[in-house]
Image (spheres, rainbow, N blue to C red):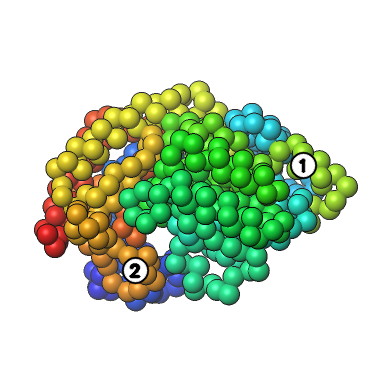
Amino acid sequence: MADDQLNETERLDRAHVFGTWAYQSEVSPKEIVEAGGVRFTAADGEEYLDFSGQLMCSNLGHSARRVAEAMADQAREAAYVAPGFTTEARARLGELLADVTPGELTKTFFSTSGTEAVEAAIKIARSYTGKEKILSRYRSYHGATYGSISVTGDPRRLAAEPAIPGAIKAPDPYAYGSTLEPMESLSYIDEMLTLEGDTVAAVLVEPIVGSNGILVPPDEYLPRLREIAHAHGALFICDEVMSGFGRTGEWFGCDVFDVTPDIMTTAKGLTGAYAPLGATTVTGEIAAHFEENMFCHGHTYSGHPVACRAGVAAIRTYREEGLIDHAGRVGAYLGDRLDELANAHPSVGDVRGVGLFRGIELTKSSEKRVPFGHREDKLSKGSTVVDEVGDRAAANGTYLATMINTLIVAPPLSITRDEVDEAVSHVDDALTVADRAMVD
Ligand SMILES: Cc1ncc(COP(=O)(O)O)c(C=O)c1O
C-alpha cells in the first residue's frame, strides 16, 4: 500500500519496525484497534471474523477477561521475579500442565515462545541420551531461532543454513502431495534410523503438521513412529505449539492418536495468546536425569509470573467453559462445511484436518494436483493465487492465514456454527478467484 494511504501508526511502524518473514518493501501492516470474541477491528473501521485465530494461537478468542484480569492482578502483586525464586502462578501452571498433558509428562521448563520450547527440547534430548542428532521432517516448522530453524523442514530454514550439526530430515505423511504413501514414509524413517546407527537423540514431529499444510497422519502412524523411535534408542518429541490446547477437539494433537511423547513442546494456546509463554514438558524419568546432571539452560524470563498466571487462567478457562469439547463438536460441523466447499470448487484439491484445525489445499489442475503456491514461494517476492484468495476473503470480512498452497482454518475455539457459516460464505466467494485461475 502506498505510504499516503497509511495512517500515522502504520507509517511509523513501517519506518521503524521490521515485518517478519518478508521483503520489507512489501510490508504494509494494518493497524488493529480492537478485538472481541472471534472478531477484530482495524483502525479504518473494517471488521474481520478471525478464521485463523491470528497466527493459529488465539484459541480463547479475543475477550477472555478472566485471563486479562489474572495478568493485571499478577502485574500488580509481583510482576517479575528472577527464575531462582518461584511464584504460585509458576508452580500451579507446572502442576496443571502435568495434569492436562498425557502419559508420564510431569515437569516443565518455561520459556517465552514456541521456538524456545523447541530449543530446550533439543538440549534436553541431547543431554539425556548423550546423542546429538535430531530427526525431523521436511514439511515442518519448529521455530525461528538457530536450533529450531535447523530442525525445521520448510524453506525458511534455507536462509539460516548451515544448520546446527546433527539436524537430519525425513519425508512426511502427506497423502495428497507426496510421491510416498504416508506409511511408506514411516518405513523410510525406520531405515534412516537403522543407517544412522545409535546416534539419534530424538525424533521430533508435529503430531498434525500445522503451517506446512495441516497434514493429518493415518491413525496408526504416530503410535508406530513412537515405537520405531524407541526401538532405535531415540526419544519421541511432539511439538504441540500449534496443535495443542483444544485445537483438535482434544487437549493435544497426540491425544487424537492416543500416543504419548517423552517430551512435549507447547506455546501459542498455552495462554490463549494473551502472553508470550513456551513450555517444554518431560517425563519423570527424563526429569530425574537432571537431579545429578546439570540442567544447563535458562532465560531471564523463564517462568515469568504474568505469563504463567495467564497460563493458569487459560487452562482453567478451557476446562470450565468446556471449550475443548465445543471445539470437537463445532469442528465436526466445520469439516462438513469445508467438504461442501471442496465439492463446489474445482480449485480445492484437498480439505483435511481435525476439530478446529483444518486446511484447504488449492490446485491449478485437479487431475494433476498442480499447486498454485510452491515451497520456494515462501522465500520469493510477490503474492500467489493462494494469497489472492486470502485477500478476497479479507475483503469479504474473514481473515484467513495462507501458507504455501493451503488456507489454514484455526478459529478461536468458542466459534459458533453461525459464525462458521458466515466465514464459509466469505471463503466460498473467495475461492472463485482460484477457480478462475485454473489451467484446466
Ligand atoms: C509447530 C510449531 N512449533 C514451533 C513454532 C514456533 O513458535 P514461536 O513462533 O512462538 O516461536 C511454531 C510457530 O508457528 C509452530 O507452529
The answer to which of marks 1 and 2 sits earlier in the sequence is 1
Residue receiving disc 1: 287
Direction right: furthest residue: 292
Label 2 SS: helix
Q: Residues within 10 Å of mark 2 (few under 14, many from 20)?
A: some
Residue receiving disc 2: 377
Query: Residue 74, position in %: x, y?
Result: 63, 39
In this view, the residue in front, 396 or 8, is 396
The amino acid type found where label 1 is placed reads Ala
Apparent side of residue 248 relative to residue 119 in the rendered image (left or right): left
Q: Name the quarter where the C terminus is drawn.
A: bottom left
Residue 341 seen in this snapshot: yes
Residue 115 seen in this snapshot: no
Q: Label 1 CB, ligand 1: below 8 Å?
A: no
Residue 70 disc label = none
Q: Is residue 112 above or below residue 96?
A: below
The span from disc 1 to disc 2 (Cα, nearest Å) is 41 Å
Q: Residue at x 34, y 39 (%)?
A: 38
Label 1 SS: helix
Q: Label 2 CB, ligand 1: below 8 Å?
A: no
Query: Residue 438, position in %: x, y?
Result: 15, 60
The amino acid type found where label 2 is placed reads Asp
Q: Residue at x 61, y 64 (%)?
A: 167
Location of residue 270 (image quadrant):
top right
Apparent side of residue 71 relative to residue 326 in the rendered image (left or right): right
